[in-house]
Image: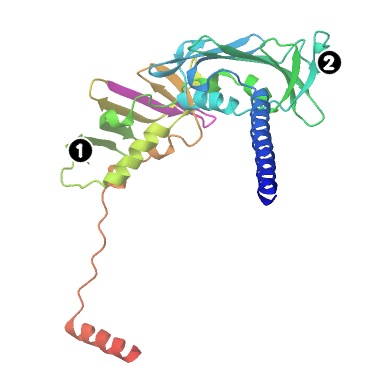
Amino acid sequence: MKLKGRSILVICLLVFGGYAVYDFFHEKKMEEKRSMDARLMTVNFEQVDWVQVEKGDQKITLKRTVDGWNMEEPLKDQADNTAVDDFVKGAFPERIIETAAEGDSINWSLYGLDKPAGKVTFKTTAGTQNVFEISEKRNFEDNVFARRDGENKVLVVNSVWQNRVNKGVMDFRERRFLRHKIASVDEVRLKNQVESLEIRRVEGQWVAPAQKDLKLDQNKVREFLTAISDAKASEIVEGKLPALKNLFVMDLTMADKKWKAEVGQAQDLGIFAKVSEPAQAMKMEAGALDRFIKVSLADLREVSEPKQPKKSEAEESQAMMAEQKEK
């Protein structure tokens, strides 16, 4: 009887264990399904190579190439790779908060989707796409109504989508003062109100050709070059520049080309630059080029630690005696 009772107990444990395992995996599968259903983006993030933002008459089209993102509309130019990548990456973690309405009889005007504020489209190399129409209206929780891929559903999504459709050309256009890699620069010449400065890279070290005995601090030079690379414009100026007071002229020499910038200040204290390669004019961000207005070669020199005067024997003896007393 004991053996029979144990067998029944083992069978019961196996049955209950099987149900527990089944329930665990069923719940896990349902959770995965709920997570998939809540995904807002359905295309493959890694394959997105085309983005379009439409609002009113404005249409901004961005396309990725092997060299990075380019702007195709409303003008052809390089795009800011970081800005576009952040735009795409920021959209993919988004989730559907809830479905506000569904079916063939939706009153789209009730949700502001009969005339949406704008549209954002993501296309992939595989030919798939997601198109999001974004409403100007928000619900009582300040979330936004949206329509995806023409579906008969009103989705409630994060209000950040309204910021996405409000992006302008300058949010995506390349605005760097220098569009070339700073590591390719071999020579810098700068003429400002203080002096004419020239530094050159020789065998991996930056030197001043006009003052061969002057030792440059390589870290200070790297900071100087980084400031050139980091400088950005607030806008690209398509028309005529205002009258400018000359601040400085910068010439850079790279392995296969030369680059030049003429920088001046307008009456309203705005800083403007005319650059080559590509030839364009720009209004600079506040403070972007300030360090070059009065920089001199002395600012880049290596400063040695001041030598301490040598102590006399009497001073050393007194110092030793004072140290002994303290002990």
State the residue position of label 2.
110
Of the pair 260 and 119, the residue shown nearer to us:
119
Magenta segment boundaries in residue numbering: 258-272
How many numbered tags mark residues here?
Answer: 2
Amino acid marked by disc 2: Leu
Q: Secondary structure beneath disc 2?
A: helix
Image-based side of 196 in relation to 116, left or right: left
State the residue position of label 1.
204
Regarding residue 63, the answer to whether it shows in the image is yes
Image-based side of 193 in relation to 24, left or right: left
Q: Secondary structure beneath disc 1?
A: loop
Q: Position of residue 191 (x, y in %)?
A: 31, 33
Identify which residue is drawn at 55% across, 25% down: 87
Residue 262 covered by magenta stretch: yes
Mark 2 and mark 1: Cα distance apart in space: 66 Å
Q: Residues within 10 Å of mark 1 (few under 14, many from 20)?
A: few
Identify which residue is drawn at 70% across, 49% down: 1
Residue 128 covered by magenta stretch: no
